[in-house]
């Protein structure tokens, strides 16, 4: 194994911008924990407090993107090299 290459948790998407499925077990653990924490957090919040729920959801999405940015392949727009549309 090459120790010079960082161990990424998430691979960059093959086409377009963003990340795909996790590469490492740490990425899978984070993804599953995040998916479980979102509805559990919403259940714990007061029912009628929409701004708090929106804030919680926004914070969770920001956390997800931040972890992907920190532990994922570097971003860069990727295009289909085969030509065409």
Image: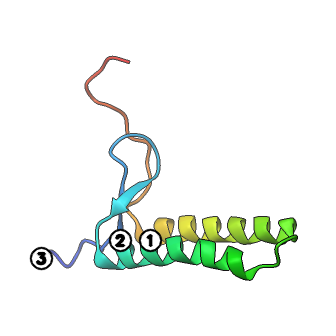
Density class for disc 1 (Cα within 10 Å; few <14, some 14-19, many ≥20) is some
* Res 15 quadrant in image: top left
Label 2: which secondary element:
loop
* Res 59 quadrant in image: bottom right
* Res 44 quadrant in image: bottom right
Which mark, by number, is residue 31? Answer: 1
The residue shown at (39%, 79%) is 29
Q: In the displayed structure, would residue 49 be above or below residue 15?
A: below
Determine whether, in the image, residue 50 is placed left or right of residue 61: right
Determine whether, in the image, residue 85 is placed left or right of residue 37: left
Residue on which the image places disc 3: 1
Residue on which the image places disc 2: 9
| Mark 2–mark 3 distance (CA, rounded to whole Å) | 16 Å
Are the residues flagged by discs 2 and 3 in contact, CB closer than 8 Å?
no
Q: In the displayed structure, would residue 16 be above or below residue 33?
A: above
The residue shown at (23%, 75%) is 4
| Mark 3–mark 1 distance (CA, rounded to whole Å) | 25 Å
- Viewer-side label of 2, 1: 1
The residue shown at (46%, 52%) is 18
């Amino acid at each position: 194994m090459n120790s010079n290459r960082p161990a990424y948790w998430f691979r960059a998407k093959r086409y377009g911008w963003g990340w795909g499925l996790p590469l490492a077990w740490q990425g899978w653990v984070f993804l599953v924990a995040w998916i479980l924490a979102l509805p559990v957090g919403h259940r714990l919040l007061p029912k009628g407090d929409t701004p708090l729920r929106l804030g919680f959801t926004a914070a969770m999405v920001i956390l997800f993107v931040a972890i992907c940015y920190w532990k994922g392949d570097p971003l860069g727009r990727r295009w289909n090299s085969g030509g065409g549309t």
